[in-house]
Image (tube, coloured by chain):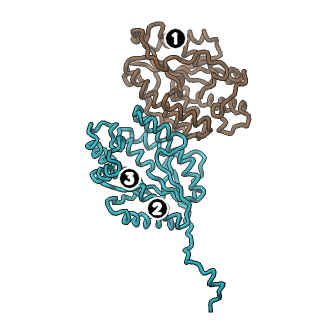
Amino acid sequence: MLKTFAELNFPGRLIAVEGLDGSGKSTQIYLLKRWLELQGHKVYFSEWNSSEIVKAATSKGKKRELLSPTTFSLIHATDFADRYERHLVPLLRAGYLVLCDRYIFTAYARDTVRGCPPEWVRGVYNFAALPDLTFFFKASLEVSLNRILDGRPQLKYFEAGMDLRLSTDPYESFRIFQGRILEQYLAMSAEFKFTVIDANQSVEDQQNLVRDLLSDRIDLGKFKGNGVYPARASTPRRNKWKQELVEE
Amino acid sequence: METGISRGIARTQTKRILVPRPSQRRFYGYGIPGVDVNKLAGKLIVVEGADGSGRSTQIAKLVDWLEECGHGTVQVGLKRSTLVSAELEEAQQGNILSHTTLSLFYATDFADQLENIIIPALRAGFMVLADRYIYTLMARDIVRGMDEQWVKNVYSIALVPDAVFYLNVSPEELVQRNVAKSAALDYWESGMDIGLSRDIFDSFLQYQRLMAEQFQRMQTTYGFTIVDGHRSVTEIYADLQKQIELVLNKPA
């Protein structure tokens, strides 16, 4: 049974956000990070699929459409492991609030939709402890899709789930793929105690709620810093509009 | 009385090329989604052993022999995937990856070759010769303190080979062969990343002993053939040939 960082007696705490592309979770975690650091807390931010070392291989695999469900899963696990072992764990041991834009649940959902056995995927990631708090931004499928698809962006092969052969139309494929991912998220919501945020609300209302919930669950007073922050990878990309909203 | 024509087409005695019977094939565990193992007609033969155990020499001889016999062959090995081999090599040069990351990087490399080379080749009825397989990867991980159940789960995607030969050579002999070949001991083959000793020579001996222990231990689970690698190239080759013949003739 996986444990949280608090249960493992780490001085730091890990807060993760999960949700569909276009659910607004990146905006929310960005605002949360800004608030925490301006309050003088020790904060570190880490994004899914952002390990410097693994990135070259992942982007090559995606560009050339070389990835199968198994290698897609393993290469993202490699990326995660690198960030986990080199950044997340040391910072959590150093008593930081670590904010993660996507965590293992993203892999659970995506890899399972791609056809990997769920037990295998969970096994691959079981070196990682659970977040102390997971916000799930639950927007209706239509709202998420519209946020992404309004501008008719160029959808990339894997992000549209084209490898699943759901439809020859990338937009239709993306819709079906996102719908299945949403089903996966909802199915694990209770098991992993997701704190569900209604992502159809305004940015401000959601941020109010997120700040309140965080202050409620975590004693923020313990995370006062000296105003110096780890420089690398600490700032989420701002204003990711339209096509850039789609991750992977 | 023989006619001129019949003499003209008299040919050298050709042995009929034997068509191996398909094996009962399975994955160790979860396998690769969507792959029908019953359609994999070829044979998967693995040669395991440390650097300097004679793996490459034996594989080269086996390939010549199998091709002479009329079998299509394909070779695979660690760190040879299109997907990540270059990136993995680069990351290793800097030695900045931690164990889980390195382990998953190797698993990605293996999975890519499994899906894009091994499985298609077996489907086409080829003999696949693997210069190392998941056992080296698992032994390396376990020696580095990774959780064995975790490692087994990761590699449960692998196909069970038709034969696995482990060329067993003592660490002392491996030292001799490695320095004779390259006048140095390899950093990773000496397990220098684990910190067994700051002295590469001591570290090499200790590390190779630990690896050999893991192979001995795995032998019971995975049932591979331990081959005495101290003998001459010819003797080992004859031994491998004999056992591979059995695999080729094995009834389903």
Dot 3 falls on a residue whose secondary structure is strand
State the residue at coordinates (58%, 33%): A110
Q: Amino acid at mark 3?
A: Gly
Q: Earlier in the sequence, mark 2 or mark 3?
A: 3
Q: Which residue is mark 3?
A: B49
User: The residue marked by circle 2 belongs to what chain?
Assistant: B
* A11 sits to left or right of B63: left
Q: Which chain is cyan?
A: B
Where residue A212 sits in the image (x, y, percent)? 52, 10
Where residue B247 sits in the image (x, y, percent)? 48, 64
Where residue B20 sits in the image (x, y, percent)? 55, 65
Q: Which chain is brown?
A: A
Q: CA distance from mark 2 to mark 3?
A: 16 Å
Q: From the image, which quarter does the N terminus of chain A lie in?
A: top left
Dot 2 falls on a residue whose secondary structure is helix
Are the residues tagged 2 and 3 within 8 Å (C-beta)? no
User: The residue marked by circle 1 belongs to what chain?
Assistant: A
Q: Is residue B192 above or below residue A20?
A: below
Q: Which residue is mark 1?
A: A34
Where residue B203 sits in the image (x, y, percent)? 28, 42
Q: Amino acid at mark 2?
A: Leu
Mark toward the viewer: 2 or 3: 2
Are the residues tagged 3 and 1 within 8 Å (C-beta)? no
Q: CA distance from mark 3 to mark 1?
A: 54 Å
